[in-house]
Amino acid sequence: MTAVFFNPLQDGYVDDPWSHFSEMREHEPVHQLAIGGYSLFRYDDVFALLRDPELSVDDRNIDLDDERAQLRAEFGEQMEFESILGMDPPDHTRLRRLISKAFTPRTIEALRPRIETMVDDALDRMAEAGTADVVGELAFPLPFDVISEMLGLPEADKNQIRDWSGAIVKTLDPIISEEEMRAAFHANQNLDGYLGEVIEWKRQNPADDILTAMIEAEEEGDRMSPKELRDQVNLLFVAGHETTVNLIGTGISELLEHPDQAATLRNDPSLDSAAIDELLRWVSPVQFSRRITLAEIEVRGVTIPPHTFVQAALGSANHDPDKFGPTAEQLDVTRAAAGQHVAFGSGIHYCLGASLAKLEGQVAIGRFLRRFPDARVEDSRWNGRINLRGLDELKVSVA
């Protein structure tokens, strides 16, 4: 067997992770990482890992290296960001049930007219200018403004929250420097304090918004604690926002680079829903998810010890020809099986915000393509992130 090593820091990886994933699927689908832990690259293994009820998502079950142990001791409780992403049952079950009361399908669908207005306003500004940065003018502000309006946050605070969330999101990468980790912890402190003040104000001034609904969500006398509320709102900005930015920005870029697929979607609005699933499969806005073993497990003959970090390569699974056939490495907005992607994870930790992200993606990408049939890419720049891979900039001509 050919010796291969997964190194997301090598030159060209962010531009093209797919060739690296292909190599890993073929030669070493269960790979021991140089940084510790393991990574799984084939769809069947990733899907099984995500749905295994015997695995944990609580990082406190990992045997920490010396550096992370020192940082945990230094920052204490400030390192404990307890979102549902890092909770096991029964805590996860309880909290997800409460949060889902504020994210019903009816609540999300009711946002469609406002999202359409936001998108049309951005497209009007692009049309007037003739050129635009799709990320800066559409992909980034749209989900941020939607989340802020949903929560009823003050307009003046958006830029500050954007800076904090940008620092915190780096912690979702599998490789992070000590400097980035420290910056993320300080940003989390600041955001946590700010959200505490907002939540207290909202308790005294309830309104028709998601934050009020989360505060008032109750089942059998149980409500979220102040810290639980802060951490879940924090999660909306850190994970919910960045992933949708990547879907919209990278999705538009890929369609403009595949004009035949753009034309197919442009001419048939009935494909909007299926096309978003195909774009989620194709660009995989979240490239990796993780689980922690509580006992020894075996995958394809490889024994993984307990208390070990196991990385599910979602991006690789979504391009696996064993699942999606010989055209897995082709973009096809008519693909019948596109909805079987794992871009939102699977099992009990399936993304609560999936329906909102898909709605924003459908509206933004569909309306952009139909408004600007002759749009073309002039320049683009990747954000350099390993996990939440996307574009920092996408300059297009829309005239």
Image: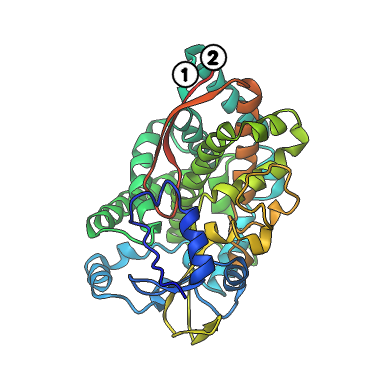
Amino acid at dot 1: Thr
Q: Please indicate whether residue 177 sits to the left or right of residue 231 in the image.
A: left
Please name the residue that numbered disc 2 is placed on. 399
Tell which of 211 and 125 is nearer to you.
Answer: 125
The answer to whether residue 322 is above or below residue 106 is below
Q: Which mark is first along the chain, 2 or 1?
A: 1
Hey, which quadrant is residue 59 in on the image? bottom left
Q: Position of residue 221 (x, y in %)?
A: 61, 66
Tell which of 185 and 172 is nearer to you.
Answer: 172
The answer to whether residue 138 is above or below residue 351 is above
Q: Which mark is residue 131?
A: 1
Instruction: Count every numbered label the image shows and give the total.
Output: 2
| Residue at x-position 44% and y-position 57% | 231
Can you say which quadrant of the picture contains the C terminus? Answer: top right
| Residue at x-position 43% and y-position 34% | 154
Q: Please indicate whether residue 185 sits to the left or right of residue 345 in the image.
A: left
Judged from the image, the secondary structure of the residue bearing numbered disc 1 is strand
Hey, which quadrant is residue 252 in on the image? top right
Residue extending furthest top? 128
| Labels 1 and 2 touching (C-beta < 8 A) | yes
| Residue at x-position 21% and y-position 67% | 74
